[in-house]
Amino acid sequence: MKPKIHPKYYPNAQVICACGNTWTTGATVPVIHTDVCSACHPFFTGEQRIVDTAGQVDRFMRKLEKKERKIAEIKAQRKSLEEEQKAKRIAKRMGAA
Protein backbone atom coordinates (compact mmCIF):
# COMPACT_ATOMS: atom_id res chain seq x y z
CA MET A 1 0.00 0.00 0.00
CA LYS A 2 1.06 3.53 -0.65
CA PRO A 3 1.68 5.55 2.46
CA LYS A 4 -0.42 8.63 3.33
CA ILE A 5 -3.21 8.05 0.75
CA HIS A 6 -5.78 6.53 3.11
CA PRO A 7 -8.03 8.71 5.27
CA LYS A 8 -7.77 8.55 9.04
CA TYR A 9 -10.10 5.94 10.54
CA TYR A 10 -12.13 6.79 13.65
CA PRO A 11 -13.23 3.52 15.32
CA ASN A 12 -15.57 5.39 17.72
CA ALA A 13 -17.21 7.87 15.34
CA GLN A 14 -20.37 9.42 16.78
CA VAL A 15 -23.53 9.21 14.62
CA ILE A 16 -26.25 11.73 15.52
CA CYS A 17 -29.74 11.51 14.02
CA ALA A 18 -32.16 14.42 13.69
CA CYS A 19 -34.54 12.60 16.06
CA GLY A 20 -31.89 12.70 18.81
CA ASN A 21 -30.79 9.08 18.62
CA THR A 22 -27.00 8.57 18.82
CA TRP A 23 -24.66 5.62 18.43
CA THR A 24 -21.03 4.91 17.65
CA THR A 25 -19.54 3.24 14.63
CA GLY A 26 -16.33 3.18 12.65
CA ALA A 27 -15.93 5.86 9.99
CA THR A 28 -13.50 8.23 8.32
CA VAL A 29 -15.05 11.27 10.00
CA PRO A 30 -15.38 11.75 13.77
CA VAL A 31 -19.03 12.94 13.78
CA ILE A 32 -21.81 12.01 11.33
CA HIS A 33 -25.16 13.86 11.24
CA THR A 34 -28.07 12.03 9.59
CA ASP A 35 -31.74 12.85 8.97
CA VAL A 36 -33.24 9.41 9.62
CA CYS A 37 -32.23 6.27 11.48
CA SER A 38 -33.81 2.93 12.38
CA ALA A 39 -35.44 4.55 15.42
CA CYS A 40 -37.37 7.13 13.40
CA HIS A 41 -37.63 5.76 9.83
CA PRO A 42 -41.24 4.76 8.96
CA PHE A 43 -40.10 1.40 7.58
CA PHE A 44 -38.75 0.38 10.97
CA THR A 45 -41.30 2.13 13.19
CA GLY A 46 -44.39 1.09 11.22
CA GLU A 47 -45.93 4.57 11.34
CA GLN A 48 -46.88 6.48 8.24
CA ARG A 49 -45.61 10.02 8.12
CA ILE A 50 -46.22 12.33 5.18
CA VAL A 51 -43.82 15.22 4.76
CA ASP A 52 -45.49 17.97 2.76
CA THR A 53 -43.15 19.80 0.42
CA ALA A 54 -44.74 22.92 -1.05
CA GLY A 55 -48.26 21.47 -1.00
CA GLN A 56 -47.39 18.39 -3.04
CA VAL A 57 -49.29 16.07 -0.71
CA ASP A 58 -52.41 18.25 -0.87
CA ARG A 59 -52.18 18.40 -4.65
CA PHE A 60 -51.78 14.61 -4.82
CA MET A 61 -54.74 14.05 -2.48
CA ARG A 62 -56.95 16.35 -4.59
CA LYS A 63 -55.90 14.49 -7.72
CA LEU A 64 -56.63 11.15 -6.05
CA GLU A 65 -60.08 12.31 -4.88
CA LYS A 66 -60.88 13.60 -8.37
CA LYS A 67 -59.94 10.23 -9.85
CA GLU A 68 -62.08 8.38 -7.29
CA ARG A 69 -65.07 10.63 -8.07
CA LYS A 70 -64.60 10.01 -11.80
CA ILE A 71 -64.48 6.24 -11.23
CA ALA A 72 -67.66 6.43 -9.13
CA GLU A 73 -69.39 8.41 -11.92
CA ILE A 74 -68.36 5.87 -14.55
CA LYS A 75 -69.61 2.98 -12.39
CA ALA A 76 -72.93 4.76 -11.86
CA GLN A 77 -73.27 5.41 -15.61
CA ARG A 78 -72.51 1.77 -16.41
CA LYS A 79 -75.02 0.58 -13.84
CA SER A 80 -77.79 2.80 -15.23
CA LEU A 81 -76.90 1.74 -18.78
CA GLU A 82 -77.04 -1.93 -17.79
CA GLU A 83 -80.43 -1.38 -16.10
CA GLU A 84 -81.77 0.32 -19.25
CA GLN A 85 -80.52 -2.52 -21.43
CA LYS A 86 -82.04 -5.08 -19.06
CA ALA A 87 -85.38 -3.25 -19.15
CA LYS A 88 -85.27 -3.17 -22.96
CA ARG A 89 -84.55 -6.92 -23.11
CA ILE A 90 -87.44 -7.66 -20.77
CA ALA A 91 -89.77 -5.37 -22.75
CA LYS A 92 -88.67 -7.04 -25.98
CA ARG A 93 -89.36 -10.49 -24.51
CA MET A 94 -92.76 -9.39 -23.27
CA GLY A 95 -93.64 -7.95 -26.67
CA ALA A 96 -92.47 -11.10 -28.48
CA ALA A 97 -94.38 -13.47 -26.18
Image (cartoon, rainbow, N blue to C red):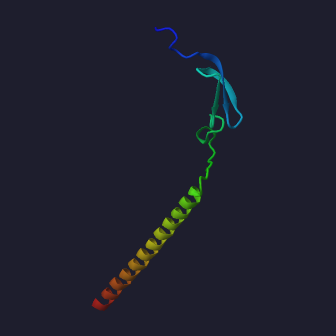
Is residue 33 shown above or below 84?
above
Toward the viewer: 66 or 91?
A: 66
* Residue at position x 30%, y 91% in the image: 95
Number of marks in picture? 0
Would you identify the image quadrant in which residue 23 lies? top right
Residue 83: x and y in percent read: 41, 80
* 77 up-or-down from 94: above or below: above
Choose between 21 and 29: the one closer to the eye: 29
- Farthest residue in the bottom direction? 95
x, y percent for residue 38: 62, 34
Q: Along the line of sight, which residue is nearer the eye, 34 or 37?
A: 34
As drawn, the residue found furthest toward the right would be 20
Residue lying furthest left in this view? Answer: 96
Quarter of the view holding residue 37: top right
Residue occupying the point 47% across, 70% down: 70
Quadrant for the C terminus in the image = bottom left
Residue drawn at (61%, 37%), measured in percent from left and top? Answer: 44
